[in-house]
Image (tube, helix red, strand yellow):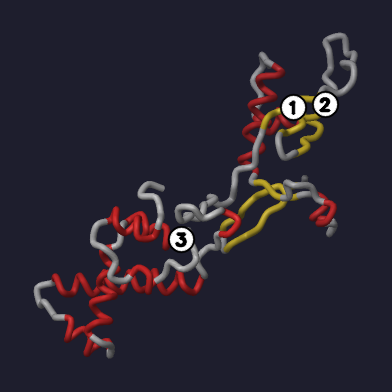
Amino acid sequence: MSPSHARKGSVKYRYYLSSAVLQGRASCAGLVRRVPPSDIETLVVKAEREHLKLTSPIDDRGLINTHVARVEVQSEQLVLQLRHTQKPNRQKSNGDSILNVPWHKTPSTRQREMLLPAGMPRQHARPIRSESRALLVASIARGRRWLAELLAEGKPNAESIAKRERCSVRQVNLTISLAFLAPTLVTAAIEGRLPRGVGVERLRDAPIEWSRQHAMLGLPEQF
């Protein structure tokens, strides 16, 4: 890997990039193509200090420049190739030393697992459509906003909201019912973890008890 960077405004972001990718041979690159320097440099310095047990002080950059010839980033470990060291009699040590350091790449995004209705095989499950998810999240927010209006001092009624929004009173009441969804279901909706078929129409006018909402959908209460 080779050091590289990117800029966003005045901020510089450093990272190590696969040499094959830099040379335009992305198909030849391994499993690890880009890593942030913090994931690599801290481990390399720590491993080197523990391995060498140096008695004289040396800064991190000097340590790497003096004692590390090469670092190979693999999916399960870092392979450090150490430079020849000079002994007091000015004779070099026999061959380069190899130091293996356990390492895993930190996931760039947190993996979120889709909720599965009871009895549904995982291979048959499909996540909620992106447009259905966006509509559901927007409807929940609208329902909460309208509920807050009804509880405010002015106390507008459903009829006045319906007139303003140019929809029916029934539409207002059904949308407000989304404000009473269980927090776990709201979070799953925002994160796109609900299964396909669980959208606005399915969740409007749901039972007020959170446990019954989960039972209605066949989803676990705790997830």
**Mark 1 belongs to which amino acid?**
Asn
Q: Which residue position is annotated with label 1? A: 100
**Mark 3 belongs to which amino acid?**
Leu
In this picture, is 200 found above or below 61? below
Q: Earlier in the sequence, mark 1 or mark 2?
A: 2
The one of 51 and 223 positioned closer to us in this rendering: 223
The one of 77 and 203 positioned closer to us in this rendering: 203
Q: Which residue position is annotated with label 2? A: 83
Q: Residue at x 70, y 24 (%)?
A: 48
**Element class at badge 1:** strand
Q: Position of residue 161 (x, y in %)?
A: 21, 83
In this picture, is 109 found above or below 99? below
Q: Position of residue 40 (x, y in %)?
A: 66, 38
Q: Dot 1, crowdedness within 10 Å: few (<14), some or many (≥20)?
A: some
In this picture, is 122 found above or below 195? above
Q: Dot 3, crowdedness within 10 Å: few (<14), some or many (≥20)?
A: many
The reply, left or right, for residue 210 in relation to residue 138 is left
Dots 3, 2 in contact, CB < 8 A: no
Q: Dot 2, crowdedness within 10 Å: few (<14), some or many (≥20)?
A: some
Q: Which residue position is annotated with label 3? A: 194
Dots 1, 2 in contact, CB < 8 A: no
Q: Earlier in the sequence, mark 1 or mark 3?
A: 1
